[in-house]
Amino acid sequence: MKFFRKTQKEITDYNEIRKQQLELISVELKQARIERNIEKDLISNQLHIPLSILNALESGDLHHLPEPFFTRQLIKKYANFLKLNGEDISQQFSIELNKKVYQKKSSLRSFYFKIPLNFKPQHLYFFYFLLLFFSIRSLSSVLESSQFTQIKIPQKQVIETKIPPTNNTPINTTPEAIPIVEKKEEKPPTPTEIVVKVTVKEDSWVKIIVDEKPVFEGILTKGLEKQWNGKQRVTIRAGNAGGLFVTVNDEKQKELGKSGEVKNITFELPTQS
């Protein structure tokens, strides 16, 4: 008897394909730069592309490059600067993403058992009285517990007052009771959404994902200020993390990372306790 069913499906690994394509493209870009005797520092300053990204393009290092779509744009921009056909060269780099494959869990066949049950009227009466008995017992326990609920009485502070005695004024020896006002600690209000403000100090490619939905992808230029609001989380993927300064929910502004660093950071709304 077979209980499990296995299915095999051929999956295309686009990351491996991109790796092979980038190796061929990197050789062509590096050779063209050397033939024209152009330093990479000069290209980085004029194209506003971090030096680490240029090194990754010329060495075929796919792990230190951003998303495939943006990598294609970088290849096109770099090739055009080297007087090559950037459109044709960039089209040689695939931007297809790997499809997620969900394997169905193997399931056992269902077995059904038939149990003959013959109930008589006296059996039903018996179960009815049992149900009635336990219902009354649970109700009485709830009523008893509610009668003995402790009521908190505000405390009083006793202050002894001294009054100088006189011939006509009787001395009051009864201390005066002054109630103490209990102060409740006020907790800061819990934010209902997460607000991420980005200030651009250097040009950088950025992809913004708000609540699992992409809302922006492109290059932010120096001097821009952007803000994104999310109900749960905001994710920032940056090709030049050192060029971005981030403020989350009016907290202190922080630098996203180092200059030329490719970084992926998610800011989440704190859970309510």
Image (tube, helix red, strand yellow):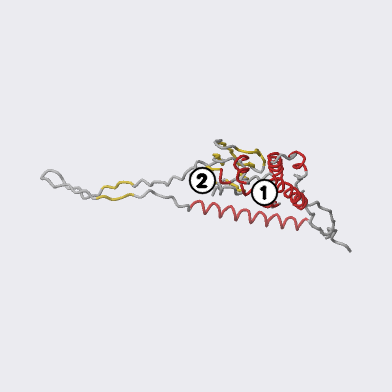
Question: Residue 123 appears at what percent x and percent y?
Answer: 75, 58
Q: Which residue is drawn at 61% across and 43% down?
A: 42
Q: What element carries label 2?
A: strand
Which disc is residue 55 wearing?
Answer: none
Q: Residues within 10 Å of mark 2 (few under 14, many from 20)?
A: few
Q: Which of 20 and 80 is in front in this view?
A: 80
Visible residue check, residue 197 = no
Q: How crowded is mark 1: few (under 14 residues within 10 Å), some or many (20 or more)?
A: many
Question: Residue 204 appears at what percent x and percent y?
Answer: 60, 41
Quadrant that contains the N terminus: bottom right
Q: Which of 263 and 153 is in front in this view?
A: 263
Q: Which of 71 and 41 is in front in this view?
A: 41
Front disc: 2 or 1: 1
* Residues at marks 2 and 1, CA–CA distance in whole angstroms: 23 Å
**Amino acid at pointer 1:** Leu
Q: What element carries label 1?
A: loop
Q: Nearer the viewer, residue 179 or 119?
A: 179
Visible residue check, residue 131 = yes
- Mark 1, residue position: 65
Question: Residue 211 appears at what percent x and percent y?
Answer: 64, 42
**Amino acid at pointer 2:** Lys
Q: Residue furthest right?
A: 1
Total number of numbered labels? 2
Q: Which residue lies furthest to the bottom in this view?
A: 1
Q: Which residue lies furthest to the left in this view?
A: 167
Question: Residue 32 appears at what percent x and percent y?
Answer: 71, 45
- On screen, residue 260 versus residue 154, left or right, reads right
Q: Tags 2 and 1 in contact by the CB under 8 Å rule?
A: no
- Mark 2, residue position: 254
> In terms of sequence position, does the residue under pointer 2 or pointer 1 come before the other?
1
